Amino acid sequence: MAQYKLVRFTLNGKEVEKMVDVRASLTDMLRNDYHLTSVKKGCEVGECGACNVLIDGEAFNSCIYLAVWADGKNIRTLESLTGPDGEISDIQQAFMEESAIQCGFCTPGFIMTAVEILETKKLYTRDELRKLLSGHLCRCTGYENILNAVEKTMKRRLGVPVE
Amino acid sequence: MSIVGKSEIRVDAFDKATGRTKYYEDRMPAGALFVRIKHSEIAHGFVKSVDTSEAEKIKGVVKVLTCFDAPEIDFPTAGHPWSMDPEHQDVADRRLLNTHVRYYGDDVAVVIAEDEVSAMQGVRALKVEYEALPFVLDPQKAMEDGAPQLHDEYPHNILKHTSIRKGDYQVAIREPGLIRVEGWYETPTVQHCHIENHGCFAYEENGRITVVSSTQIPHIVRRVVGQAIGRPWADVQIIKPYIGGGFGNKQDALYEPLCAWCSVMVGGRPVRVDCSREETFVSNRVRHAIRFHITSWIRPDGSMAARKVDLYSNQGAYASHGHSIVAKAMGSFPQLYPCDNMECDAYTVYTNIPAAGAMRGYGMPQASFANDSNIEECAHAVHMDPVEYRNKYIMPQGYYDGFSKNCNYYDSHRECLEKGKELIGYDEKIKEFAKDTGPIRRGIGCASFWYNTAVWPIALETSSNRMLLNLDGTVTMQCGETEIGQGADTAFAQMAAEAIGLKSYKDVHVVSCQDTDTTPTGLGAYASRQTYVAGFSIRQTAELLKQKIFAYANKLTRQSEHNMEIRDGNVVRKGDGKVLISLKELAMTAQYNPQDSEHITAESTFTIKNNAYSFGCTFAEVEVDIPMCKVTVKNIVNVHDCGNLINPALAAAQVHGGMSMAIGYGLSEQLLFDPKTGRPLNNNLLDYKLSTVMDHPDLEAAFIENPEPTSEFGTKALGEPPACSGAPAIRNAIYNATGVALRKLPMNPHNLFAAFTEAGLIHDEWQEG
């Protein structure tokens, strides 16, 4: 029989609480209870990165993170990057402009890892960025334009010239 | 005339960047029941019984259906247009659930439950009793006398055998002084690995059945669902929302028929089938593993006197796209490197592995690997530079193929090779790399490919289109062609805006979500056809729409319809360019005129009776660590002549994706099966080695834009071609670096160790160095 537990956490800047099935993954809770459908399911065992969200600023595959562990945490999904009037962040704009989006299924996960990278305010080499992004699989883009979008946004934020 | 040819941002980019885009699972009706599938745990045999009693006791389980409940209807699944000629219809060889199971993973029974956990517990509680039969995994073994037989109607498991005979091979090989270049070339079973697994949900409404599915081919799936569940096709409605990639796997009816039947069996309640990643690998479709035997007879100057090619294609358990794939592969041989005397035989053979279907390239990644590997060996045999060899013997300008009526109007192959050489720095690097003799060696290799655009004359080519003039002067457009992630909608919007005369591609709203009840009939995303075929119906429909606009404008402005054109969203007088009326004003007036109201719309179908060659090549630079048996791709360039580019940035992005797939095909991907049981061994994204961003160098896409004369917008195939020539280019680079002619994909450390050992390259001296 299913057991339920109360979790209280911050979700995209808002304090929330929910009774959740103790067996549910964070992916399940975000999608089913909060309708945050940017959180995608590609493997449900932590291999593909499509369900990636930020938990206290750190990127996690939400499919292998229990919903009950969210208690007391600050969780951010891609939906948090869009402002109340539909304004979007520089990294989203860069994904659009660099043609880094094709089918769009891996995009939310990639962008949230990019947010984690950008928030470190460090300048990484292209090879370092490859390593930092390697937890995500994409079959459409060959990663080329995704890497370009992240690298350019990083440089712009740090005031480093972009070729 | 400037909307086509510009790198515009995708029409769906904003929604995808914000996570708003809805895929099938994001549109799920509340309360949909979960269908979970019991898959066969033997590679071949008969289901004797299924004990459902324990499963039915589980709380939440609504119904259990087994192979003994399924309708006795055999149906085909391939995403091919319906053929009115029964001889050309796809092979109908499977049922919704099968008592005769033919691979480890075949569909035996389903549990329908209120929640996912109960459904999965129900599947685990089913007790299936089998009568196991011997099985066979290899196509040539399956052809032997006494091999296990999969389908009674196909002796020796041969689904089909076709041949090409040209000149006289047997006589030609007697010419004195010929050099024989012979080899077996082997390609593995791989999977599409779109990041969104296939899934769908179905429900009944007003006595009809609706299936919302992650598919590339909504109209074809409607027909297959009708066939499989024994309902009139018009009783079925398929809805295709945005989909998370397809690459050919979703160019097949996958679980839509089973899902529709399950809904019917629970009184039309909504039910859902969601494939897990493990199921996607095994119980959807895979790419055919094809084994080639090539014998080339060349003269001392390298010219090809005679050539024999045998192809053995591993079909797996069910026909799906069947022989079409290896037939296309075979068809490329006489054309890419023409030869007067050829004998080619292609066999498609059933075996007890998952069913192979369409996958990006449709036989050409396999053919390109075998052909351009052998061609490289031919060049070596006569001590010619491999690029020079290709330049001399590849399809010449003006080459005409009588069947497809395709003509190589330009010298596309040589132009692409020349550009590739320049971009990779070929001449300097081969001199530098020739000095490498130690454990780390560098090399450059190239490979060309052959491709057709669309499927005419093999099958129907049709495109339908509907345009509606909106009250604000913009146009809403419905195409029969589907967006599956490649950017088709954006290209269509650009072409339509240009054809009508609108200001921007943003003035065309492409209805991306398709519904077979309302979307004009189309065939869907396959054969790298859509930009080419949609071009015809977009142009034709735009002309019809303009005629209606001009007729109404004539009533309002007194000017002749023949003296009008549309520029930047205004109807103007051709003679002096005077703006007569804006489309917005015209549309509003037409709609709300109390005397003469009109909703201005146009619709048409274009039957395409053309095809188009689409060519190109890959150059790859590798570093081979011989003792580690490790290959690193340092640089890679693809050059394509796909005609005029509609959207250069999206074209390059498409090429990057294909190159990535080709690198994986070359170096790491293979779906493995246990030889003792037929069980898949690595059907997950951890053990199946899909390239990550760390496994690639930067990918360079380049184009030669020779306008295609048969095409409305000068364009031709680009969807699949980028996936074709990468693996053989890497293979040839390794060959040129090490002198070892690899014959088997993937070129992973496991296979390299065997080949390097055989070549005497693995020895203790490396360690001392």
Image (tube, helix red, strand yellow):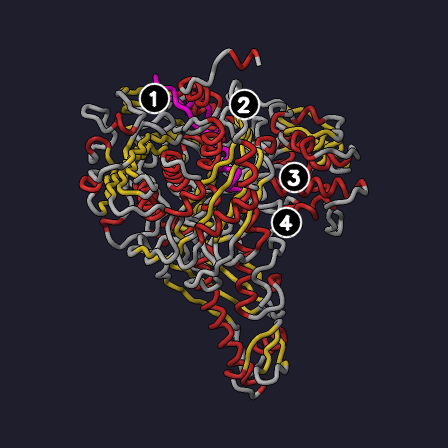
**Residue B768 horizontal/vertical position (percent):** 56, 11
Give me the disc on residue B15. Answer: 4
Judged left or right of residue B170, residue B1 is: right
Tell me where residue B372 appears, x and y as whole percent: 40, 39
Residue stretch in magenta: B657-683
Residue drawn at the location 56% of the way across and 26% of the way down: A45
Q: What amino acid does circle 3 point to? A: Leu
Label annotation for residue B365: none
Mark 1 and mark 2 in contact (Cβ < 8 Å)?
A: no
Q: Secondary structure at mark 4?
A: helix
Asked whether B276 or B424 is in front, the reply is B424
Q: Residue at x 34, y 17 (%)?
A: B676
Going from the N terminus, do you reach mark 4 or mark 1 first? Answer: 4
Drawn side of residue A12 relative to residue B502, left or right: right
Name the amino acid, label 2: Asp
Chain to which mark 2 belongs: B
**Which residue in the structure is indicated by mark 2?**
B625
The residue under label 1 is B42
Answer whether residue B127 is visible to the viewer in this image. yes
Query: Which residue is depicted at the point 50% across and 48% down?
Result: B418
> How many neighbours does mark 1 have within 10 angstroms: few (below 14), some (14-19), or many (20 or more)?
many
The answer to whether B307 appears left or right of B14 in the picture is left
Residue of label 3 = A147
Seen in the picture, residue B233 relative to B278 is either above or below; the reply is below
Residue B506 image-quadrant placement = bottom right
Q: Position of residue B298 (x, y in %)?
A: 30, 39
